[in-house]
Amino acid sequence: MSEAGVMTTGYSIKAASELTGITEDTIRYYEKIGLLPRAQRKENSHRVYTEGDVELMKLISCLKKTGMPLDEMRPYLNLSRDSNLSEYPELYDKIQIHKRKILDQIASLQQIVDFIDTKVSEGNFGERKRNEDCTLTGDVKRMPVRNK
């Protein structure tokens, strides 16, 4: 950083976007709502992100893929990098509950994969056998979306 507080090295918003898979507009939005700290600026006023900023963006992206709402992420993002989560019992419990929901979703999806595999191996999608079930359990509205 220069004497005037203007950052001279780091990642551009484009580079940060490419490293994290988060669009430039979304990065700006996360800054606007305070999910990310305001980026430092170059002398030309372009945003510059640190390695720590990029790691924070990756954490946001990861938690978002699990279906965690942005507001529920805030407490985790506010912890310092050297914080021990076990020192925050309420946050620790919440993330464990969230993890359990993810594991339940994985188990539910595996049942569906098994159902499809059975249908494919039998070569008959039209006929249903007794006790054959293909239901998605859990909060289906919050299933993670996989980008292609």
Image: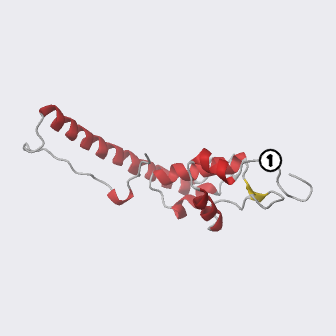
Q: Residue furthest top?
A: 121
Which residue is at a point 60% across and 46% down the rendered structure image? 18
Which residue is at a point 54% across and 57% down the rendered structure image? 90
x, y (%) of residue 39? 73, 59
Say which of 89 and 126 sits in front: 126
Q: Residue tagged by mark 1?
A: 9
Q: Quadrant of the C terminus?
A: top left
Which residue is at a point 71% across and 51% down the rendered structure image? 12
User: Is 9 above or below relative to 45?
Assistant: above
Q: Secondary structure at mark 1?
A: loop
**Image quadrant assignment for residue 106:** top left
Q: Residue furthest front?
A: 44
Circle 1 packing at 10 Å, graded few (<14), some (14-19), many (20+), is some
**Image quadrant assignment for residue 23:** bottom right
Q: Which amino acid type is shown beneath numbered disc 1?
A: Thr
* Residue 60 can be seen in this image: yes
Say which of 129 and 97 sits in front: 129
**Image quadrant assignment for residue 33:** bottom right
Which residue is at a point 75% across and 59% down the rendered structure image? 46
